[in-house]
């Protein structure tokens, strides 16, 4: 009898399945990432501990707490962080555009914390798996998160709406480098999106979260990854 590999997922709203409800324009959970298909096809048992708004620092605390539980054994932990880490306090920027403003997690701290998590998991005999970030729709993001704020001041600080895309992309590229530097498995979620002809068709009205079709792309990214990684101990059946 084949044994199911235990996989735990820690991340933010992306893997939690948060979407914008197009009827009332509010956030709600509508997770269409096909976990059942992934489990059944590859003999996995998956538990999702992702939380809305989570950063890599908060994620480290959650993972550390989880490792202290009596039932904490698992073969691998999938992590998706960066989307909230790279975000700014747009209200403060609108009010004081000439000041210095830092993201929720500066890039150096983001990288260092991810390295620390990876080291911790390896010390506990758990295979870490990272995921890249799906792209933003910069204009939608700006219109949504800066609504009601001083957009002129925010644009003065940004230098242009496209800067939002490039800044978030830096965090995804950092994840790729972390994976390469630490010999850690990587699920390239971003590639599934940027390979589409119209990326915005897979992104919600807020420009940040992915819609149902986007969640299907995430499913495919994981299925492709597992198929390519069957030789790895984390998913060997």
Image (cartoon, rainbow, N blue to C red):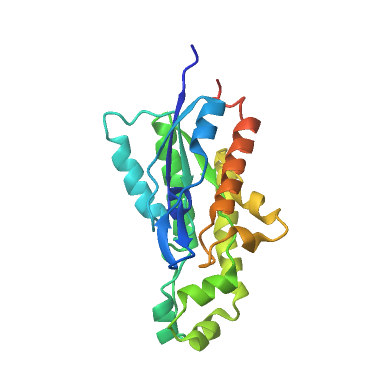
Q: Residue at x 45, y 41 (%)?
A: 118
Q: 201 left or right of 182? A: right
Q: Residue at x 33, y 46 (%)?
A: 62
Question: Of residues 149 and 181, which is closer to you in this image?
Answer: 149
Q: Residue at x 38, y 49 (%)?
A: 59
Q: Residue furthest right?
A: 197
Against 99, is 216 above or below?
A: above
Residue 217's x, y, as percent? 61, 48
Q: Residue at x 40, y 38 (%)?
A: 120
Asked whether residue 234 is in view, the answer is no
Question: Of residues 225 and 213, which is closer to you in this image?
Answer: 213
Question: Of residues 18 and 66, which is closer to you in this image?
Answer: 18
Query: How many marks do you count on the picture?
Result: 0
Q: 18 left or right of 171? A: left
Residue 139's x, y, as percent? 59, 74
Residue 61's x, y, as percent? 32, 48
Asked whether residue 10 is in view, the answer is yes
Against 78, is 212 above or below?
A: below
Residue 74's x, y, as percent? 40, 29
The C terminus: image quadrant:
top right
Q: Residue furthest top?
A: 1
Q: 12 left or right of 202? A: left
Quarter of the view holding residue 123: top left
Q: Residue furthest front?
A: 23
Against 223, is 178 above or below?
A: below
């Amino acid at each position: 009898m084949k044994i199911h590999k235990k996989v735990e997922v820690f991340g933010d709203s992306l893997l939690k399945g948060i979407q914008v409800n197009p009827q009332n324009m509010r956030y709600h959970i509508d997770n269409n990432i096909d976990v059942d298909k992934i489990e059944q096809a590859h003999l996995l048992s998956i538990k999702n501990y992702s939380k809305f708004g989570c950063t890599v620092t908060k994620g480290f605390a959650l993972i550390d707490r989880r490792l202290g539980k009596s039932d904490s054994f698992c073969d691998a932990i999938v992590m998706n962080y960066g989307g909230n880490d790279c975000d700014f306090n747009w209200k403060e920027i609108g009010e004081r555009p000439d000041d210095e403003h830092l993201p929720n997690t500066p890039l150096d701290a983001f990288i260092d914390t991810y390295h620390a998590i990876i080291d911790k998991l390896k010390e506990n005999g758990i295979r870490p798996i990272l995921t890249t970030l799906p792209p933003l729709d910069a204009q939608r993001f700006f219109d949504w998160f800066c609504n009601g704020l001083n957009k002129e001041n925010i644009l003065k600080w940004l230098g242009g709406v496209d800067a939002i895309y490039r800044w978030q992309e830096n965090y995804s590229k950092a994840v790729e480098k972390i994976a390469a530097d630490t010999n850690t498995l990587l699920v390239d979620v971003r590639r599934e999106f940027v390979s589409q002809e119209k990326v915005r068709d897979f992104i919600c009205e807020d420009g940040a979260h992915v819609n149902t079709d986007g969640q299907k792309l995430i499913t495919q990214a994981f299925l492709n990854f597992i198929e390519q990684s069957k030789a790895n101990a984390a998913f060997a059946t």
